[in-house]
Amino acid sequence: MKSGFEEARKLLNGLIGSKVDLIITSGLHKGNYVSSLEELDDGLIGVTHPTFKGRFLPLSRNAELSLKIDSYNGVYQADVAVSRSVLSVNIPLLWLKLISPLEKVQRRMFVRVPASIKANAFFLGADNIPEPLNAEEAPSELSLPPKDWFSVRISDISLGGIGISIKQDIAHFCLEGGRYLLLIKISGVTMFIVGKIVKILIKKEGTIEIGFAYEGISVSIEKIMMSYIRQQELMMRG
């Protein structure tokens, strides 16, 4: 993979200092670990050595994992293998070798997995639609959703957005282009996510399918979602 590394070197040089996610999909230490890109040397990528419960994460030579780099101009990912660890320095490093090409991806391209999670949503407002000071002054044609919590069900999830199902009798709560606060519990963790309804599709049997795109999610929420998505992927594969 040396030639592949040479192709990626110019890009990697420009990403020094960027946030890195190291993703382990199996074994005792399965999960996501935050790191950063520190050095390049002799065909290898040096990242800060991840920790687990206050100790350096034990990783054997040639152990395979996924690497995702967040940068100002996009997200890059590749499969990598452990070459060596150097711990007795000021910045302990984990040295990795590429085993697949480093590719740029868009967040919307991350895998979407089915889910069935109860959640609640609250209408925050909509861009370019003036809100009156009180409800009595609101023109009827605006049909703004009520400012109240309502129940939804998460039907699928990705790192770019969520698919939501609601009953048709509460369709008046949903406005395409509207901003919403979503209260959701994933893997035992309760979180609040702000986003926008980008698509409303009425389906049979009295249900409405909604596309919900995040305005932005924190690193901690992204890690929880990535772990959940990986678990669902493994379950689907059997």
Image: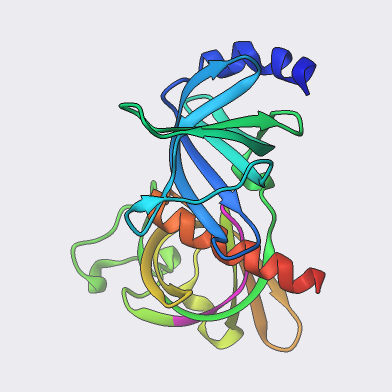
Q: In which quarter of the image is the C terminus?
A: bottom right
Q: Is residue 167 left or right of residue 78?
A: left
Magenta highlight: main SS = strand
Residue at x 57%, y 61% (from the top left corner): 30
Residue at x 60%, y 16% (from the top left corner): 11
Residue at x 64%, y 44% (from the top left corner): 66
**Is residue 32 in sight in this rendering?**
yes
> Where is 123 relative to 151, above or below?
above
Q: Indicate the position of residue 148 as horizontal and vertical percent values.
A: 32, 78
Give the magenta-colored segment's residue range. Answer: 151-159
Residue at x 66%, y 49% (from the top left corner): 110
Residue 158, magenta (yes or no):
yes
Q: Is residue 54 left or right of residue 78?
A: left
**Is residue 213 in sight in this rendering?**
no
> Where is 87 relative to 176, above or below?
above
Q: Quadrant of the N terminus?
A: top right
Q: Indicate the position of residue 3 as horizontal and vertical percent values.
A: 78, 15
Q: Nearer the viewer, residue 137 or 238?
A: 238
